[in-house]
Image (cartoon, rainbow, N blue to C red):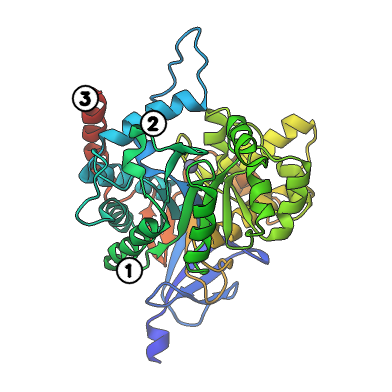
């Protein structure tokens, strides 16, 4: 009796579950936001909140550098006659990284996380390496900056997995450059202190999770990479950048006589715990072996496009049942539907085919990105079933193409044609975005604009 009274019910026009669309969908959630009732039949004698929309599982953002949002769109004037590539962009990014104090980082992250919610992301993995103060000195609270990210996420209402990053050197065998002083951990034991401090810092923010990471094989010595993998608890998802740039692959070969992924395969460390960000440049042997390890590739289509990284071999990878999810990385794009579309269209254009991702690409795109995204943030890969939290994004039923679609066509209609922002986003059964509105948006925008003006006028 008490149980029944504490359940809140929604009626969605339709809800996407692992078994397909449920139309209509009556969903009951308990006080903690867990789904306790899910059926097309109306429950007896209860109050219902009608939702005039089609709901997908909340999207998972598997790779974010929050501070880079401040410079999104600001690195697009390319000097004539000079090659502008990832490495020149990185210099601009370092400048941005060096300008920020903890308050400013929190302001940037708060708006970013609100905007992610407004686009339908409900959980973000923050790949965080901006650890120390502007002089490279540790803050008195070692995880000060990570704590600010957790505070921003809590204020915005998005779930966060904080992934403190181990960053030790400038390149393979090259000592840290002064521009990287805010990122530095001297060795694995320093990194583990940072990880512990981060665990402590997020205690104040219930529900925040922790991950582990080395930045990349270029930024941490091989010995320390293996130590960090062994020394961090297995249940923490382990993230690292891999093979984003051709130069990085070449430098790795010069140093280890192995490509980055080859090096990881050779040391036999990869398993389901691993999240390889980008994985852009894989050779035939790597793309063949990777799926069997259980590791997941985190593709970041809009950032990879913006930085001119190259093409991840998604069609081949998917045909071998490789695991993948998405991230917005530098945040030039924040729409998950756009990221998914870009993944498929890159392959269609390259291969001059309409079905590079198989018979049901929309299903592959949504389900793989959500399920493996959930794993990337340390959660089990289950969505919108009884026992799961009600984390969902809702698209307006009044959209003409959606309204005209049926259960068979609706998912592809959303993925391939929909460009309006969602009307609502639910996290643990609570509206964080409702009627397109987030309660903190006006204040967060004003604060963000002020911070961005301040940091770029001081350059
Ligand atoms: Zn990254």
Q: Secondary structure at mark 1?
A: loop
Q: Residue at x 48, y 8 (%)?
A: 80
**Foreground: 311 or 108?**
311
> Does label 2 or label 3 sit earlier along the sequence?
2
Q: Residue at x 43, y 55 (%)?
A: 425
Name the residue that disc number 3 marks: 458
Query: Residue 48, can we see it?
Result: yes
Crowding at mark 2 (Cα within 10 Å: few <14, some 14-19, many 20+): some
Q: Quadrant of the C terminus?
A: top left
User: Compared to 227, does 337 lie above or below?
Assistant: above
Q: Position of residue 27 (x, y in %)?
A: 51, 71
Crowding at mark 3 (Cα within 10 Å: few <14, some 14-19, many 20+): few
Q: Secondary structure at mark 3?
A: loop
Q: Residue at x 53, y 49 (%)?
A: 240
**Foreground: 245 or 39?**
245
Name the residue that disc number 2 marks: 93
Name the residue that disc number 1 marks: 206
Q: Quadrant of the N terminus?
A: bottom left
Query: Residue 410, can we see it?
Result: no
Q: Position of residue 358 (x, y in %)?
A: 78, 48
From mark 3 to mark 1, how far is it between C-alphas? Answer: 36 Å
């Amino acid at each position: 009796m008490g149980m029944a009274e504490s359940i809140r019910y929604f009626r969605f026009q339709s809800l996407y579950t692992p078994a397909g669309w449920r139309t209509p969908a009556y969903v009951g959630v308990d006080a903690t936001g867990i789904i306790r009732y899910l059926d097309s039949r109306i429950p007896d004698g209860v109050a219902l909140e009608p939702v005039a929309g089609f709901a997908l599982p909340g999207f998972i953002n598997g790779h974010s550098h929050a501070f880079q949002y401040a410079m999104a769109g600001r690195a697009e004037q390319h000097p004539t006659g000079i090659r502008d590539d990832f490495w020149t962009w990185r210099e601009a990014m370092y400048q941005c990284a060096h300008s920020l104090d903890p308050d400013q980082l929190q302001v940037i992250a708060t708006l970013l996380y609100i905007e992610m919610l407004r686009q339908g992301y409900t959980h973000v993995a923050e790949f965080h390496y901006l650890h120390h103060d502007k002089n490279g000195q540790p803050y008195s609270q070692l995880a000060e900056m990570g704590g600010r990210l957790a505070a921003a996420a809590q204020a915005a209402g998005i779930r966060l997995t904080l992934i403190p990053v181990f960053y030790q050197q400038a390149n393979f065998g090259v000592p840290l450059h002064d521009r990287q002083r805010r990122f530095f951990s001297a060795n694995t034991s320093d990194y583990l202190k940072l990880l512990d401090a981060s665990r402590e810092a997020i205690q104040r923010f219930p529900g925040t999770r922790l991950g582990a990471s080395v930045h990349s094989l270029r930024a941490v010595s091989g010995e320390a990479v293996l130590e960090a993998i062994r020394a961090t608890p297995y249940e923490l998802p382990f993230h690292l950048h891999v093979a984003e740039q051709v130069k990085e692959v070449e430098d790795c070969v010069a140093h280890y006589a192995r490509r980055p992924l080859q090096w990881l395969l050779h040391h036999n460390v990869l398993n389901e715990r691993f999240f390889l960000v980008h994985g852009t440049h894989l050779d035939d042997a790597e793309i063949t072996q990777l799926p069997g390890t259980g590791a997941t590739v985190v593709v970041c289509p809009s950032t990879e496009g913006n930085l001119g990284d190259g093409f991840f071999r998604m069609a081949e990878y998917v045909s071998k049942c490789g695991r993948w999810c998405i991230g917005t990385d530098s945040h030039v794009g924040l729409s998950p539907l756009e990221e998914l579309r870009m993944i498929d269209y890159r392959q269609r254009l390259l291969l001059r085919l309409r079905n590079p991702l198989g018979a049901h690409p929309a299903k592959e795109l949504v389900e793989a990105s959500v399920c493996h995204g959930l794993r990337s943030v340390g959660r089990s890969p289950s969505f919108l079933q009884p026992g799961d939290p009600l984390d969902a994004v809702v698209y307006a039923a009044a959209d003409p193409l959606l309204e005209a679609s049926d259960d068979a066509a609706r998912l592809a209609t959303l993925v391939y044609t929909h460009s309006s922002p969602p009307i609502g986003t639910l996290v643990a059964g609570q509206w964080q975005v409702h009627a397109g509105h987030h309660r903190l948006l006006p204040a967060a925008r004003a604060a963000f604009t002020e911070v961005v003006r301040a940091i770029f006028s001081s350059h």
